[in-house]
Amino acid sequence: MPLPALLALLALANPEGKPTVFAQHAPLALRAASANRASLPRFGKLELTLDLAATYDNPFDPDDVDVSAEFTSPQGKTVRVNGFLFQEYTRQLVNGRDEKLEPIGKPVWKVRFAPDAVGTWRYRVQAKDRTGTVRLPEAQCTVTVGTDPGFVGRSRRNPAMFAFADETPFFAVGENMCWAGGRGTYDFDTWLASLGKAGGNWIRIWMNNFNTTLEWSPETREPDAPTWGYHGLGAYSLDHAWKLDTMLDTAEQHGVYAMLCFGTYGEFTTGGFFGEGQWPKNPYNAANGGPCAQPADFWTNPTARKLYRQRLRYILARYGYRTHIQAWEFWNEANAPAYWVEDMASYIKGVGVFAGPPADPFRHLVSTTYGDDAVWKLPEIDFTMTHNYGTGNIPDHAPVIHNDAAQFIAYGKPHLMAEFGIDWRDTDRKYDPNGKGVNLHNGLWASAMSGNAGGAMLWWWDNYVAPENLYTPFVAFRRFTDTVHWTAGPWKPLEFDPPRTTDGPETFTDLTIPSGTGWGKAAQSDFTVTPQGLAGSAALPEFLYSPSKADLRTTPTFHVRYSHPGRFALQVNTVSSSSRIRILVDGKPIRELNLSAVPPTDPNRKPEYQKTEFKQEYGIYQAVFHKEYAIEVPAGAHTVTLENVEGDWTSLDSITLSGYRSSRYPNVNLYGQIHGQEAIVWAQNAAHNWKNVAEGKAVPVIKGASTTLHGLPRGTYTIAWWDTHTGEITKTENVAVRSETGDLPLHLPDLATDVAAHITPQPAR
């Protein structure tokens, strides 16, 4: 029978609208639970396949049928694990490009468990439906010593870092791998083999409706059968669930851990640049029979929240045993309110109003994007994340990633730059057609040296990294990060003197500071501009908000000191609706910019912008300018203030101070971290960025630069200099710190690109 006809028939048999595609009406009987093995290593997979008959309309609703098992450790600790419905499939690749699944047999109930202690475990399975409860006799399994380190958590000694229970660090080295193409799971076979071989140990997978989500509005799939496709609210796609199992199996085989993201912002929007808006097809939409009249209702509607927890229950039951799931992520770029995030995280962890046996007894880490201050402060949220993209306007993400990391130190949790790329609209391959991978390379190293819990995760995995075979940057990076004692204790940013050089006559060049923050209120509004850039870990705000966005608005002021008269220039990127930007020097207005995204009414008047577009969802025009506006600044010390006094908002690519950088202060990005007697350093020739490389510009080698590190205790140290491209140590030197302030002079190697250093104490003799 065709699936639409089957669904219609089942709907007639179920006037309350409950999903019935997997309905069963049989006397309750639990006849057996067959284990995949009687003996297994610690953290291995124990899978029970149940011979169960019961009465239910929806096997995914625990109020209709509830299957579980209780496991008791040799030490007497009891763990409850929920069961789930499972369908086996085989896969094949048709014509070398299309994956095809075929179901094997009928759906069965399973329970999966990963024991965390050696010895004899006892377990008992039970099932409950509307007619009663049945239990099997107690059974046993033997757990032996294994090699799996277990589940990833947070370090007790360094809460800003990931670690296993024995404090072995888990430093994330990888990329996004959010969905497959037509080859389905076969794509993951290829990608994961390459990433794992290069030392990658982390990916991020989305459960979206064209990949591996479980719940979506019904659609027809071939062949027509209940075990295929989507079935609406509360009934899950068993073929997609099997695909995700297969992807996760492959990841584990290659030593790769996964952060599993349950959904994405497009589920709540319409339209979109990529056509990603899917609210019209969302099963939670009232137009499709769901409980939500508008997207915002999803966060508050009791039925929607209950259905979402039900879906979480299935995901956690099916995949929770996996040690190679690094974390759960609720959303990709959906601004879930803190109260909703707290509610769902509490359900997963079994705390708060859900105090009791946790839905995830294996206690995986939990996070989401986007988050705000209220979300990140939740004790139920284990780590923070951000995403950052340019529009081709950011020549190097290294300073952006560094500044981003500095803003999240205060939370005392691990932080990840979980997505980044040159342009959110198009692949990095557009800007790097020769596959040099400079932005990927710089993003990895800047992230580690800025205090993040992993390398920055590039977005364009399928149309840039894979086709260009750009896995080499992960090799050296993994080799280096494996040598660092991340969980020895809390690390903090390393303090340096500005790098200096005495070679040649002193000359002056322009200083360009790229914007380093995304949407939201800037962390600070007062900045000091040194010959190297903004002092400290400050980041140039990207957005200048008008009073209409008072909660986001700041008026940045820059303290400058020009050795001779020069220019202060703004590189304007985008204007939303309109803005009136006032530029003040020493508190006095010098220039006003009246910027408008609205097309001129006079056809003979040429607009200042390059292009404009009417944003239907906001009811306004937004225009791309990519235009410079400058003022003259006298020699000496001054303040320059930027105010958006009217309109909506304007975004900046950068600011440029002409003739501001002295050749005595070379253009070097210098980042590092320190813990006790151990320190790591990354020194980058800042001119070696993707833009200069792509444009074939000469990047002069920086020679003879030196700096001074501060904060190392007295003692003798070994400095190992690493080639960041080969992963080899090129030079070691022994040095002594004798001052009370822990000063260590550091003479940098010649910088054609970048170099890393690992500073460790020499053993006492």
Image (cartoon, rainbow, N blue to C red):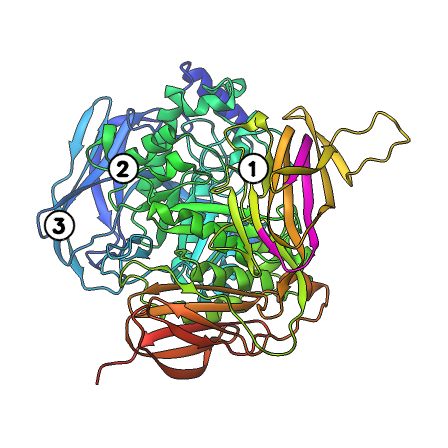
**First in sequence: mark 1 vs mark 2:** 2
| Left-right relation of 249 to 648 | left
- Circles 1 and 3, Cβ within 8 Å, touching? The answer is no
Residue type highlighted by circle 2: Ala
Label 3 neighbourhood size at 10 Å, few (<14), some (14-19), many (20+)?
A: some
- Circles 2 and 3, Cβ within 8 Å, touching? The answer is no
Residue 555 is tagged as 1
Q: Position of residue 103 (x, y in %)?
A: 45, 44
Residue type highlighted by circle 3: Ser
Q: Position of residue 186 (x, y in %)?
A: 52, 56
Say which quarter of the image contains residue 758.
bottom left
- Residue at x-position 46% and y-position 48%: 205
- Residue at x-position 44% and y-position 52%: 405
Label 1 secondary element:
loop
Residue linked to disc 3 = 73
Q: Is residue 578 magenta?
A: yes
Label 2 secondary element:
loop
**First in sequence: mark 2 vs mark 3:** 3
Q: Nearer the viewer, residue 540 or 55?
A: 540
Q: Residue furthest bottom?
A: 765
- Circles 1 and 2, Cβ within 8 Å, touching? The answer is no
Q: Position of residue 551 (x, y in %)?
A: 50, 29
Of helix, strand and loop, which mostly describes the magenta segment?
strand
Residue type highlighted by circle 1: Thr
Q: Identify the magenta region.
A: 560-584
Q: Residue furthest right?
A: 604
Label 3 secondary element:
loop
Residue linked to disc 2 = 359
Q: Position of residue 649 (x, y in %)?
A: 63, 33
